[in-house]
Every structure is written in structure tokens, then in C-alpha cells.
Image (cartoon, rainbow, N blue to C red):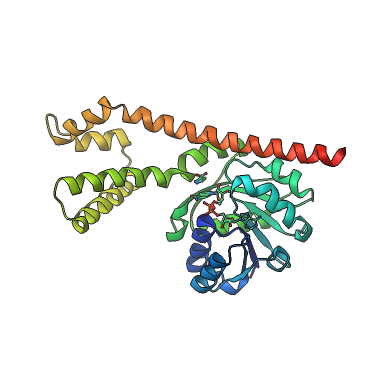
């Protein structure tokens, strides 16, 4: 059994913790979490999941086998610099910070540690994350397998080249939000059309689950499946024409491209901060 520590316990860390406790065979007592100055948040996760909560990084990190870094990208430099004294070369560091690349992480910790950069999504909480990950050259086969096993307990895992991770972030890291956005629109229209909210909710969720399962099980392309719903001169054709008039498909493509670019921009910011810090140490 491995000891797992978390630096930062926000939405993503909570989704992973709830998933691995429920499905990964990890005992809550093996999980130690550190969150900066937010006692309420620590008290909540301790009470909700039975994990150990600390404000001291030393207490959370000592003897950990795996350390998850789950703070916002802008806080990575400060959090990891503070954690550095307690990180040892036998530990596996797993960062889920969007845009922050392996070279940045290596520069901050400045130790020969195995590092995984991963991009899960919040559906981890129900065991349905789509995670992609990449590792640095110091990772051993056992540690890579451990990372794959942990993320497999909360959904699917793809090992990708690191230069694909910003695109993964724009596509599936942020992806659940795009679907929720569509659902918000469906709920609003259902309300305006006079459907009661419980009925509408069930219809919408089942429609999305059904479409996802069709995509999963059918050999047909999404375009073919769409055409099968669209009777000539029928309701779907009339509805889709409005989406086309509004250029919704292009809007979605631009949305994912922009999210991908933002991941790169956030990574570039961290690189700048690290370089500033390194040059201030040299002079
Ligand atoms: N929310 C999402 O859907 C996804 C988020 N991510 C990544 O996960 C990371 C966390 O994101 P969220 O959970 O959404 O953010 P969040 O803001 O909900 O959680 C971050 C937590 O880190 C804590 N924190 C900040 N500085 C700290 C420090 N120095 N030491 C210890 N704790 C500290 C904050 O108090 C906060 O509770 C980000 O880097 C994000 O890019 C990755 C995939 C999906
Ligand atoms: O919005 C964000 O920056 C994070 C990364 C992927 C999903 N949420």
C-alpha cells in the first residue's frame, strides 16, 4: 500500500481523492493532504473522506510514495518551492497543473525525481475521468505503472507525448465544462417550453448518456449518427440549421483552440517566473 500526499485540495484533488478511495483500493488513512491556510477546506475533506489534513507540508509529505501537486498553475512555483525540502528522490511527483511542463517542474524541484504531468478531468469523482499523461526520463517502469493504475481507478488513461498535453487540456481537461454549458442551454429552453425541471433533467441526462454510449459502441462516425437523427424536412434539421446559422461548430473549434493556447500561455508565465527566480539567485 502506497502513501499518497496532496499539495492543494481544491476541486480537482477532491475529484481524484473521492475516485481513488471509492475505486482504487486506497485506504483514506494512507492519504495526507496539505492545503494552504484554508482550515475549513481541510476540515471538510477530513470529515468527508477520512483522509488526514495538514497545514504543514512537512507533515503531509514525509514518507509519501506519491505526491500529487494540485494547486493552480500560478501557485505551482510557490507551492513546489515550499515542498522542495521534503521531497526525496524515491518519491513520484504527479502534477495536474494545466500548462506547467515537465521541464518547469524539474527546474523548480532541482532533484532527480520521477515526475508525471497528467491532465485528468473532474469526472474523476464518478470514476469517468479522461486522463492523459506523460512522464520525465527518470521514471521507472514501476512508478509509471503506479501512475497509470491510480488514474485508471478514476477513468481511462492515455500515455501521450508531452507536447500533446496542452491540446488534451483544451479538449478533455476543460471538456466537462463545455458539456455542462450545453446542458445549461437545454435546461433553460426546457423551462421556457414549459417542461417541469425533474422531467427535463432526466430527459437531458439520458440523452447525453445515450449519445455517449452510441459513440462508444457503434462503429458509425458522429456525422453518420447525427444524420440518422436528422429526418429530411424534420425537427432536427430545422434545429441544426439554427446552430449552423450561428456557426456553433466553428465556435466550439475556436473554444478548444483558445483553451489550448491558454494552457501554453499559463506554462509560459511559469517559465518566466522560474527564470526570474533563477537569475535572482545567481546575482
Ligand atoms: N478543475 C478542473 O477541472 C481541473 C483542474 N486541473 C488542474 O488542477 C489544479 C487545481 O485546480 P482546481 O482544483 O480547479 O483549483 P482550486 O483552486 O479548486 O484548488 C487549488 C487548491 O490549492 C490550494 N493551494 C494554493 N496554494 C497552495 C500551497 N502553496 N500549498 C498548498 N495548497 C495550496 C488552494 O487553497 C486551493 O484549495 C490546477 O493546476 C488545474 O490546472 C486539471 C484538470 C482539470
Ligand atoms: O480551467 C482550468 O484552467 C482547468 C484546467 C483544465 C480544467 N480546468
**Relative side of 83 to 33, left or right:** right
Marks counted in the figure total 0
Task: Decide: is 179 above or below 222.
Answer: below
Q: Residue at x 60, y 35 (%)?
A: 163
Residue 59 shows up from this direction: yes
Q: Quadrant of residue 162?
A: top right
Q: Nearer the viewer, residue 252 or 20?
A: 252
**Relative side of 266 to 122, left or right:** right
Task: Decide: is 5 above or below 269.
Answer: below
Q: Residue at x 25, y 45 (%)?
A: 186
Residue 132, x across and y down, in percent = 54, 46
Residue at the extreme left of the image, as rendered: 233
Q: Residue at x 76, y 37 (%)?
A: 276
Residue 178, x across and y down, in percent = 39, 42
Residue 218, x across and y down, in percent = 31, 44
Q: Name the image quarter holding the N terminus.
A: bottom right
Residue 134 shows up from this direction: no
Q: Name the image quarter holding the C terminus.
A: top right
Q: Quadrant of residue 254?
A: top left
Q: Residue at x 27, y 50 (%)?
A: 210
Q: Nearer the viewer, residue 135 or 126?
A: 126
Task: Decide: is 103 above or below 25.
Answer: above
Q: Quadrant of residue 278?
A: top right
Residue 242, x across and y down, in percent = 22, 29
Q: Nearer the viewer, residue 175 or 164?
A: 175
Amino acid at each position: 500500500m502506497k502513501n499518497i500526499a496532496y499539495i492543494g485540495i481544491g476541486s480537482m484533488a477532491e475529484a481524484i481523492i473521492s475516485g481513488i478511495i471509492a475505486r482504487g483500493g486506497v485506504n483514506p488513512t494512507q492519504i495526507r493532504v496539505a492545503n494552504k491556510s484554508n482550515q475549513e477546506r481541510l476540515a471538510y475533506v477530513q470529515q468527508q473522506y477520512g483522509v488526514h489534513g495538514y497545514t504543514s507540508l512537512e507533515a503531509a509529505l514525509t514518507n509519501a510514495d506519491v505526491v500529487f501537486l494540485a494547486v493552480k498553475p500560478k501557485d505551482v512555483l510557490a507551492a513546489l518551492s515550499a515542498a522542495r525540502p521534503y521531497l526525496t528522490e524515491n518519491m513520484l511527483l504527479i502534477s495536474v497543473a494545466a500548462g506547467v511542463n515537465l521541464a518547469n517542474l524539474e527546474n523548480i524541484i532541482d532533484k532527480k525525481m520521477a515526475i508525471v504531468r497528467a491532465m485528468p478531468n473532474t469526472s474523476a469523482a464518478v470514476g469517468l475521468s479522461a486522463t492523459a499523461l506523460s512522464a520525465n526520463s527518470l521514471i521507472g517502469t514501476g512508478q509509471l505503472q503506479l501512475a497509470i493504475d491510480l488514474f485508471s481507478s478514476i477513468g481511462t488513461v492515455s500515455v501521450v507525448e508531452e507536447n500533446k498535453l496542452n491540446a488534451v487540456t483544451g479538449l478533455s481537461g476543460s471538456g466537462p465544462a463545455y458539456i455542462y454549458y450545453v446542458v445549461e442551454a437545454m435546461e433553460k429552453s426546457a423551462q421556457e417550453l414549459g417542461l417541469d425541471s425533474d422531467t427535463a433533467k432526466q430527459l437531458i441526462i439520458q440523452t447525453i448518456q445515450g449519445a455517449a454510449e452510441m459513440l462508444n459502441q457503434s462503429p458509425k462516425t458522429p456525422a453518420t449518427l447525427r444524420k440518422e437523427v436528422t429526418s429530411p424536412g424534420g425537427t432536427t434539421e430545422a434545429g441544426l440549421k439554427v446552430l449552423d446559422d450561428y456557426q456553433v461548430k466553428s465556435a466550439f473549434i475556436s473554444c478548444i483552440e483558445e483553451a489550448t493556447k491558454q494552457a501554453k500561455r499559463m506554462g509560459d508565465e511559469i517559465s518566466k517566473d522560474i527564470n526570474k527566480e533563477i537569475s535572482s539567485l545567481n546575482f
